[in-house]
Image (cartoon, rainbow, N blue to C red):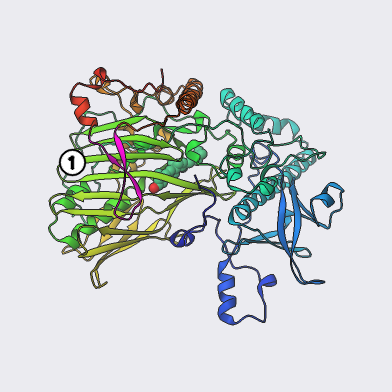
């Protein structure tokens, strides 16, 4: 796992995960000795971290945990005397940043300077690992030795800034309350807050206690850092009052196995003409909503999870794969990451259309629309996270109505990888999904690796494309929203007649904007299209200009889907378990996973307990395997290399054969839960 260490690559850095930035204030960057080109470059690489929003209502509720201590060496720039960069030992505690010449001086209490970080404007330069804190009269220029250390300091500084601001807000509102003698009223108001789910809260506090152990640090981060840098992350403050809050990036010893999976299929291809995007010539505008015989709702509405203290969870797992972090079930949606892979086929009719489009350039437009359509679910899906599949978990989805069947499997735990393969008369679709996440204090970036593949046997095409970055903005607050940004390049590995470039525009006035072009061999634009990834894509260069895709009615027409986790009809169908299907599934199928089922039925506390049990069982299985010196071997996928030498997971083509004969009831199966 190298989720935290790698610096962003080119396309990802277009899309910085830090909240909207403005120009670096003129103070520190104006150096008259630089050429104008150089100085422009320098200004360009600086980002001012947005001022943190303090939520006055909840300020006193769950954000008051004092963030863990962070300490270690950084370079500090000095103007006079001895101009230049000097190594200094910094300690960040309860919102105050102090520095001394070295670690010994800290323990002797010899502090050279200190700063309340909530009062400073913070700007960072990801390229040069630099952090500036400008509090007007006090100005710190700091530089980290590596990207890892830089990243940890930025995140921790954000946490401490937020904490300090919340503290001030709480004091302020307390003061106001006292002034207005409204003590009784305020007690009433807090009573009106969503009632805390006891199971969830006890889990969070158990977690915090575990993560209190300062000797154990985040797997991944600590393994990566040389020994001397450990203190940067997680050193206990000897002799310092460390009674409050979890230690910084520290983490519990246990590995939290909770699997990641995503795939689901559903069927809601009805296309509405109401959005204004359509000119009536959408590919399916003549399709009348037809019943699929599948369920149209979930058994229970989603729980309120606004009380769950996400901040502690995220801060204690910096640098870790989210897909391995166990979270309270109240944060989950009743689909997993294997099922979410299948959800990318919600608009599979675009692949059918592509397969019926002889012109290669037009075909590419439909493939592009398909690639974009997979992102549309994100619009209403930011309050819950999918279940993480356990290693060996599988999921199948047969959609006669849509003409495809899909299987997916959790093939690797470290790092978490979910592989899927779908086949239809018209196409094959496969991908193995893995991602790195970066938590920047206020936003969380998901950086997917791995390519998506589609083949169209009719034309011998094999399309391949990358995924863009998804950023969860305001991840700690209820004002959370998702944004996708970056560039997608679609290539046809079997022909270079055309390629396609799609840009997911980052923070633009037109939020969620996408633009794309289909280029011929010489680079000339043959088609252009654009739109919004949550509303539809229009192409005006086709023989008849038209809307090539728009989301299904079940998500566009305001209904009660928000109380059902923001699911479209297709998403609701993913975890449906009918009596005729049950005996045909292998026991490892996600539909049979009890914790997910309990959550779907609205039994949150029971789900939470069951989830713990399943995760514990997974840990035991792993221990046993490693005792025997064995490794888990996926059952339905095999590892291979693609043309570029990248590791890929491909179907081994046994699933459907075994299902048919002798049937999973008669095979030896992995037991993942009881
Ligand atoms: C902790 C909580 C409650 C915050 C909610 C986190 C949610 C919004 C996160 C957790 C995992 C995330 C998914 C992880 C991986 C991918 C694949 C990528 O190609 C598209 C985005 C997508 C599908 C992410 C969407 C956002 C996501 C679902």
Looking at the image, is 253 positioned above or below residue 519? Answer: above
Q: How many marks?
A: 1
Identify which residue is drawn at 83% across, 50% down.
104
Q: Is residue 508 magenta?
A: no
Identify which residue is drawn at 46% across, 33% down.
332
Identify which residue is drawn at 75% across, 53% down.
90
Q: Is residue 638 magenta?
A: yes
Tell which quarter ligand 1 is in: top left
Look at the image and tell me in which quarter the C terminus lies.
top left
Looking at the image, is 164 positioned above or below residue 387? Answer: below
Taking 405 as reference, is 226 left or right? right
Residue 277: quadrant of the picture = bottom left
Image location (x, y in percent) of residue 606: 49, 20
Image location (x, y in percent) of residue 109: 86, 49
Taking 24 as reference, is 285 left or right? left
Query: Tag 1: Cα neighbours inside 10 Å, few (<14), some, or many (≥20)?
Result: some
Q: Nearer the viewer, residue 172 or 653?
A: 653
Identify which residue is drawn at 58% across, 81% down.
36
Image location (x, y in percent) of residue 119: 73, 56
Q: For the magenta stretch, what is the residue range?
A: 636-653
Residue 99 visible in this rendered orientation of the protein = yes
Q: Within 8 Å: ligand 1 and the Cβ of disc 1?
A: no
Q: Nearer the viewer, residue 605 or 624?
A: 624
Q: Secondary structure at mark 1?
A: strand
Looking at the image, is 270 positioned above or below residue 12? Answer: above
Taking 583 as reference, is 411 left or right? right
Residue 274 visible in this rendered orientation of the protein = no
Reading the image, the residue beneath label 1 is: 424
Residue 292: quadrant of the picture = top left
Image location (x, y in percent) of residue 28: 69, 70
Q: Nearer the viewer, residue 366 or 256?
A: 256
């Amino acid at each position: 796992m190298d989720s935290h260490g790698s610096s962003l690559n080119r396309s990802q850095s277009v899309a910085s995960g830090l909240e909207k930035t403005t120009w670096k204030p003129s103070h520190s960057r104006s150096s008259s000795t630089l050429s104008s080109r150089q100085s422009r470059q320098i200004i360009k690489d600086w980002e001012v971290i947005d001022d943190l929003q303090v939520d006055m209502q909840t300020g006193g509720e769950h954000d008051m945990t004092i963030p863990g201590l962070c300490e270690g060496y950084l370079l500090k720039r000095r103007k006079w005397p001895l101009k230049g960069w000097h190594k200094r030992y910094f300690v960040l505690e309860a919102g105050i940043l102090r520095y001394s010449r070295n670690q010994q001086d800290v323990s002797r209490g010899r502090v050279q300077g200190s700063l309340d970080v909530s009062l400073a404007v913070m700007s960072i330069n990801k390229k040069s690992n630099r952090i500036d804190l400008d509090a007007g009269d006090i100005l710190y220029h700091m530089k980290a030795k590596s990207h890892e250390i830089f990243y940890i300091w930025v995140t921790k500084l954000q946490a401490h800034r937020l904490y300090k601001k919340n503290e001030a807000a709480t004091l302020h509102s307390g003061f106001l309350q006292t002034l207005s003698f409204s003590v009784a009223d305020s007690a009433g108001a807090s009573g009106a807050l969503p009632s805390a789910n006891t199971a969830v809260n006890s889990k969070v506090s158990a977690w915090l206690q575990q993560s209190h152990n300062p000797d154990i640090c985040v797997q991944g981060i600590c393994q990566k850092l040389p020994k001397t840098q450990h203190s940067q992350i997680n050193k206990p403050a000897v002799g310092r009052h460390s009674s409050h809050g979890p230690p910084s990036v520290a983490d519990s010893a246990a590995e939290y196995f909770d699997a990641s999976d995503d795939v689901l299929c559903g069927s809601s291809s009805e296309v509405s003409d109401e959005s204004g995007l359509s000119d009536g010539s959408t590919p399916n505008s003549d399709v009348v909503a037809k019943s699929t015989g599948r369920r149209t709702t979930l058994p229970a509405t989603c729980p309120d999870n606004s009380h769950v203290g996400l901040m502690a969870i995220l801060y204690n797992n910096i640098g870790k794969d989210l897909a391995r972090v166990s979270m309270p079930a109240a944060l989950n949606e009743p689909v997993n990451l294997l099922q979410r892979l299948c959800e990318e086929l919600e608009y599979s009719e675009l692949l059918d259309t592509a397969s019926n489009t002889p012109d290669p350039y037009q075909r590419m437009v439909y493939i592009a629309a398909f690639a974009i359509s997979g992102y549309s679910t994100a619009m209403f899906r930011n309050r819950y996270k999918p279940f993480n599949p356990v290693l060996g978990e599988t999921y199948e989805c047969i959609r006669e109505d849509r003409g495809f069947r899909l299987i997916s499997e959790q093939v690797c735990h470290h790092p978490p990888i979910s592989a899927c393969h779908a086949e239809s008369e018209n196409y094959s679709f496969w991908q193995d999904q893995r991602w790195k996440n970066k938590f920047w204090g206020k936003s969380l970036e998901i950086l997917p690796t791995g390519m998506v593949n589609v083949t169209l046997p009719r034309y011998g095409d094999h399309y391949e494309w990358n995924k863009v970055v998804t950023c969860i903005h305001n991840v700690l607050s209820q004002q959370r929203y998702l944004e996708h940004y970056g560039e997608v390049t679609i290539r046809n590995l079997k022909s270079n007649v055309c390629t396609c470039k799609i840009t997911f525009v980052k923070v633009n006035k037109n939020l969620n904007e996408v633009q794309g072009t289909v280029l011929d061999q010489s680079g000339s634009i043959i088609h252009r299209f654009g739109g919004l990834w949550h509303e539809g894509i229009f192409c005006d260069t086709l023989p008849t200009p038209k809307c090539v895709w728009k989301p299904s009615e079940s998500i566009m027409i305001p209904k009660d889907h928000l109380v059902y986790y923001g699911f479209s009809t297709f998403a609701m169908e993913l975890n449906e378990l009918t009596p005729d299907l049950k005996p045909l599934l292998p026991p490892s199928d996600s539909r049979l996973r009890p914790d997910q089922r309990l959550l779907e039925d609205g039994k949150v506390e029971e789900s939470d307990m069951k989830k713990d049990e399943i995760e514990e069982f997974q840990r035991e299985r792993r221990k046993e395997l490693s005792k025997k010196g064995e490794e888990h071997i996926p059952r339905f996928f095999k590892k291979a290399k693609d043309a570029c030498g990248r590791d890929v997971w491909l179907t081994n083509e046994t699933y459907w054969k075994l299902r048919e004969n002798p049937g999973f009831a008669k095979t030896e199966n992995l037991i993942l839960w009881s």
